[in-house]
Amino acid sequence: MFSRAIHRIGVVSLLIPAALLLLPLYLYPLVQIVSRSFGGQGWSIANYLELFSDPVILRVLYHTFRFALIIALLCLLLGYPLAYAMRIVSDRTRRTVTLLILLPLWTSSLVRGFAWIVILGRNGIVNTALTDLGIIDEPLKLVYNKMGVYVGMVHIMLPFMVLSLYSTLSRMDLRLLSAAESLGSRPISAFFWIVLPLSMPGVLAGALLVFMSSVGMFVIPALLGGLSDITYIMLIEKQINELNNWGLAAAMSVLLIVTTGVLTALYERTLNIETSAGILGQVVRHVFQRGPIHLLVWRERLLAKLFPMHASQLATGKQSAHLGSRHLFVKCCSWWVLVWLVAPLAVLFPLAFSGAAYLHFPPQSYSIRWFENFFSRDDWITPTITSLKVAILATIGVIVIGAPAAYAIVRGRFPGKGIITVILISPMIVPVLIFAISLYAIYVRFNLLGTVGGLVLAHIILALPYVLVTVSAGLKSTDESLEAAALTMGASPVRAFWFVTLPVLRPAVISAAFLAFLASFDDVILALFLSGTSAKTLPVRMWEGIRYEIDPTIAAVSVMLILIAIGLKFAAERPVKRGAKSNIAEYCGRANR
């Protein structure tokens, strides 16, 4: 009993570094936001009365929710054929499709927003092509309006929808479609009676994820929208930077945090939709998974009669290919969506090597002048060095803090573990702009504004959920008996973790470091609020360049960022040559010497 208590204390102590960081720089600032929303020391509800009585704010809130809902529906319509195609194609094609879907996720949202400005701008690719073909006389207004925001947001959010849908469709038994066809069902009937009901958990999870991410998105609406296309999160920023109305901004932030928390709770319930718990899960199962034929009740009996084969025989992929040959429309739609996802990034490559002094596609001549311009100008190099410095330090710091915290969450058993886990993951849920606003006041008080150290601390908090989730997944997939075996051989807990657990976790730690580096290096919002002029980062410099002085240097920088992200991703996926068992054997060999 005493040894168990000592072990529990040791595991809980692994959470101390995370607590020392989050308490003063995350939880306390958010509490201060709540306090400000109630008038600070006076404690009144005047700010909330103003919030719910101001027709402008309510109208913007309504338009923001409607905007997020439309984005979710568009992502569903475009993403469903692609996710379904991933289920019916061969494994080799599926790997290629997955790579193309993930490529935009590895790329900065700033880069993708700039790509759409190049494509949809007044002198962009679309308007130039339509003018040259004689279809239009005057350029169409395709960007800096609602259309530009919708196009950019769907491009940002579509991969999340596709991955959510595929995670559900991948568990669907393809024999159900063949069984329905054998019973005389048409493809459209099979879709509505079989595929759609079985995929509803993924549909709801993806829709909620896209919706709540769209509500809190700041960069794309600010880049691609017009003056009249302000969103709720942009209105909060305006209350701070232009009107200096911190009380109303705090009340608006609290409302958004509460809304995001409710949506996150619904999202978590949706992920567990196949269990018996949860009202939402019961409603979905009752409405979508119970039809006149009670398909899900007797599907196994039907499959056993029509297809008496083992699951291992189904893994050959022959049925998948047979089904795929009858889904030409789905495949065509899927490839079109893939091209739409990747093409904006591909367009930047020829523009980066353009010899012209302005953006024109296709370039009339090619040169490396814009790369030379980047490396010869201090206003580009200095922010780049700052970004690299901040990202490297933040990555090291978040791994040192996050990996032990993940170990404590997965291996530990202690009171309040669920609440602690929610707090550790919540920086992924709270909109970054609200976190930046809450941290700004603290940084002003302690002279951390405009310092590299202040940015590093903020980025560690920003990247902590990515490390926690990734390392926790790696820990859950490891065998605890390996650690026990090392302990039995005389290893101390620290040596067992260092020589056995850590090598097994190396792929997860490397992946977590990759995600943390990208989260820090791509951050715009925290840097805009906290960097000042003395610690300006590359994303802030790009933000200023895209908004005020678009030139091909930004295309060159974008291409370099894309290549860096791809290179880091492939470096992070290098196979680990030595496993945990070999490390146990090595340790035992050392012990016997």
Image (cartoon, rainbow, N blue to C red):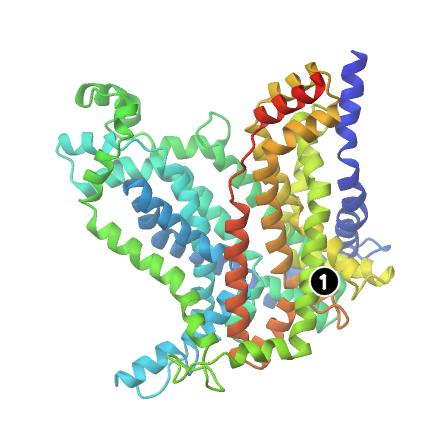
Quadrant for the C terminus in the image: top right
SS at circle 1: helix
Say if 43 sits above or below 324 in the image.
Answer: below
Where does label 1 land, which residue?
248
Say if 33 sits above or below 15 in the image.
Answer: below
Q: Report whether residue 4 is seen.
A: yes
The answer to whether residue 194 is left or right of residue 163 is left
Please tell me in which quadrant of the rendered image residue 194 appears.
Answer: top left
Instruction: Judge by depth and name the residue closer to the eye, 392 or 60.
Output: 392
Residue 507: x and y in percent read 56, 39
Residue 190: x and y in percent read 22, 38
Count all numbered tags in the image, as a single digit: 1
Kindly identify the residue that appears in the image at 46 percent across and 65 percent down: 152
Quadrant for the N terminus in the image: top right
Q: Report whether residue 212 is seen.
A: no
Kindly identify the residue that appears in the image at 29 percent across and 85 percent down: 132
Kindly identify the residue that appears in the image at 60 percent across and 60 percent down: 522
Instruction: Judge by depth and name the residue closer to the eye, 441 or 173.
Output: 173
Say if 224 sits above or below 331 in the image.
Answer: below
The local crowd at label 1, few if under 14, some if 14 to 19, many if 20 or more residues have their Cα within 10 Å, is many
Instruction: Judge by depth and name the residue closer to the eye, 68 or 331.
Output: 331
Q: Residue furthest front?
A: 593
Kindly identify the residue that appears in the image at 55 percent across and 71 percent down: 557
Instruction: Judge by depth and name the residue closer to the eye, 16 or 275.
Output: 16
Q: Amino acid at mark 1?
A: Leu
Residue 176: x and y in percent read 24, 31
Residue 502: x and y in percent read 65, 33
